[in-house]
Amino acid sequence: MRLKQLDWWSCKMSGITNAIIGNFNWLNSIFRRSEKTTADATATIIDTIPIGADNTILILSMITGIQSGGANSAGFLYAAFWNKDGTSAPVLVGSFPTSLANEKDDATWGDEPTFTANGLNAIDIKVTGKAATSINWKCVAIIINSSI
């Protein structure tokens, strides 16, 4: 009897898991984490998001940076919408990616993050630190992908 109860529970949990994963896959969503350390004010790629032919993607990125030793930090939240028609290069839909939050303790840190087409099949997310300063960056990106 106990074994049958366990089997029943396993089947129920399996169904719930499949429903959640099924919905997640249906959206073609991707969750990505990346990190980099910058030592100067040079723009550095923290993540490269692939985009295939005949796709539209929405990138929601959350980026944090903290100076070595913890003296200063930054946090950014951005949304960017890209379209790729056939095999042509991806094109940003609308204007520059929308900044939902753009905060930093030290105004001398570099520019806000950028999103640029990397050739024909990817979007680069770049961060810029501060001259002669080590900054540890982390990025979490959620990508919703629609294709035909």
Image (spheres, rainbow, N blue to C red):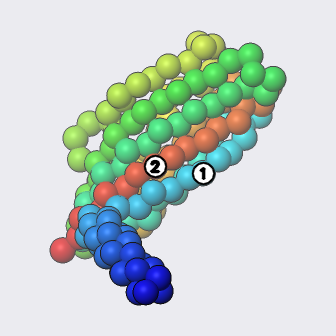
Q: Quadrant of residue 7?
A: bottom left
Quarter of the image with the C terminus in it = bottom left
Q: Quadrant of the N terminus?
A: bottom left
* Residues marked 1 and 2 touching at CB (< 8 Å): yes
Residue 50 image label:
none
How far is disc 1 from disc 2 in space, using C-alphas? 9 Å
Measuring 63% from the left and 31% from the top, which residue is drawn there?
65
Query: Does residue 78 appear to the left or right of 107 in the view shown?
Result: left
Amino acid identity at mark 1? Ser
> Which residue is nearer to you in this view: 45 or 120?
45
For badge 2, the amino acid type reads: Ala
Look at 60% across and 14% down and name the residue there. 105
The residue pinned by badge 2 equals 141
The image position of residue 45, as x and y in percent, is: 59, 48
| Dot label at residue 34 | 1
Q: Residue at x 50, y 19 (%)?
A: 103
Residue at 22% across / 41% down in the picture?
Answer: 94
Q: Is residue 87 visible?
A: no
User: Dot 2: few (<14), some (14–19), or many (≥20) neighbours within 10 Å?
Assistant: many
